[in-house]
Image (cartoon, grey):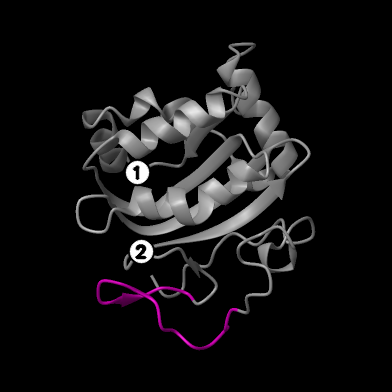
Amino acid sequence: MHDIEPFYGWRDQYIASEDKESIFHGSVSSEFQYSNTVYNYYVHPQWDEMGSPNLYIKVLFVDYEKGVAIIELIGEWNDCLANDIMLLKRNIIDGMIDKHINKFVLVCENVLSFHCDDNSYYEEWAEEVREYEGWIVILGTLQHVEEEMLDNQIDHYIQFGSVYNSIPWRTYKPQFIAGIINDIIANKHHFELM
């Protein structure tokens, strides 16, 4: 896990540590000093802490004008032991919602497991963004993670699945990804790989 870096292809458009509105403004990540772990495995130092012992994030892109945030995650999403959804919601998402972000893309290709406890934070988050015609979408879920999310009815609050997993998000500009997702949600067209 130590060699998996957050996606850096959009750094010409956004860097959270340089965003004065970001909770990570002014933060400095080491390139060489590994300290954060998922259980006994070190994660690359470019991942940011959100308060969880086993789940880390990287805010890849924020557009305050269009209300869009794209966040990549790595590790174990465990609401039972660490209450990760509460930590994500209170430490990261609430501040973004206060700044009028209402469209959230979570890239979960490196989320290795998912354990749900209570759906109340998911429900709260979904209600807050829907009030402003927003949404929450997950890209890149592993099959067993998706099955756990379905078993716990997370799909009532967050959209995920094959149509979203088929979006080659790294090849597009972040603004285009939000447009694709808007179109899928509005059922304007079914996204197909070119």
* Residue located farthest toward the front when viewing the structure as drawn: 98
* x and y, in percent, of residue 181 in the image: 61, 27
Q: From the top left corner, tell me how far across and down residue 12 is, in percent.
A: 79, 60
State left or right for residue 162 relative to residue 97. Answer: left
Asked whether residue 137 appears in the rendered view, the answer is: yes
Q: Is residue 164 left or right of residue 102?
A: left
> What range of the chain is rendered magenta?
29-44
* Numbered tag placed on residue 156 in the rendering: none
User: Is residue 32 shown in magenta?
Assistant: yes
| Residue pictured at 32% horizontal, 68% vertical | 53
SS for tag 1? loop
Vertical side of 10 occupied by 146: above or below: above
* Residue 194 appears in the picture as rendered: no
In front of the other: 70 or 23: 23
| Mark 1: amino acid | Leu
For the point 64% across and 39% down, the residue is 101
Report the disc number at residue 142: 1
- The quarter in which the N terminus is drawn is bottom left
Q: In x, y percent, where is residue 69?
A: 63, 44
Q: In which quadrant is the C terminus drawn?
A: top right
Residue 6: in magenta span: no
- Circle 2 residue: 52
The residue type indicated by label 2 comes to Ser
Classed neighbour count for the residue bearing mark 2: other residues with Cα under 10 Å, few (<14), some (14–19), many (≥20):
many
